Amino acid sequence: RYMGYCYLINNTSYRSIRFHAKKDAVWEFMGASLRDTFFIIISLGLYAPCALANLTRIKWQNTSYGNVPVKFEMKNWDFALQCYKGLFFCLITLGFYTPWFMVNIHKFKMKHLTFQGARVQSSVTGKGLI
């Protein structure tokens, strides 16, 4: 999974500047994947949002744009609360809330992504996904 991410990032450029993902971080990603899978099984799935936050953090912290690293700082439990809240609303609305849930998760991740000290913002809306 991480090597596919590396391939996509390493073959992407913006304004003639290439993105770069460190391929040697695959071992860190694999170790976190195995550890988090164990915790997901023990917690009966409740740890899944924290595991997703860990893997997302590893991906972004090993990514750079040109020579400038991308910083990603997100607390696992803040992300987990966002996920649990969204799942609760999806259950109550019988899935109607799903597009807005997906957008909220995307915006939450982007809010914690910084590049040269500037926060990344997203203009995606739930209405646009319907």
Image (cartoon, grey):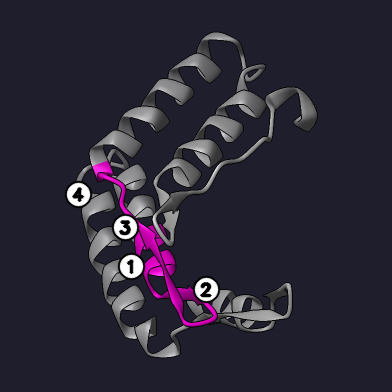
Residue wearing tag 1: 33
Q: Give the quarter of the image for residue 77.
A: top left
Q: CA distance from mark 3 to mark 2?
A: 14 Å
**Residue 66 on the magenta span:** yes
The residue where tag 2 is placed is: 1
* Label located before the other in sequence (4 or 3): 4
Indicate which disc residue 42 carries: 4
- Contact (CB < 8 A) between labels 4 and 3? no
- Give yes or no for contact between labels 1 and 2 (Cβ–Cβ under 8 Å): yes
Task: Give coordinates of residue 18: x percent, y percent.
Answer: 64, 81
| 126 horizontally vs 35: left or right | right
Say which residue appears at 61% left-offset and 40% top-offset.
122
Q: Secondary structure at mark 3?
A: helix
- From this view, report whether residue 69 is shown above or below residue 127: below
Q: Residue furthest top?
A: 92
Residue 54 tag number: 3
* Element marked by disc 1: helix
First reached walking from the N terminus: tag 3 or tag 1 = 1
Depth check, front residue: 37 or 101? 101
Residue 5, disc: none
Instruction: From the top left corner, tell me how far across and down residue 22 is, in percent.
Output: 44, 85
Region in magenta: 55-76
Identify residue type, mark 1.
Answer: Ser
Residue at the image point whose x is 39% and y is 29% from the top: 82
Q: Nearer the viewer, residue 100 or 109?
A: 109
Instruction: Inspect the image, locate mark 3, and give the three-letter code of the amino acid beneath it.
Output: Asn
Q: Label 2, secondary structure: give it.
A: loop
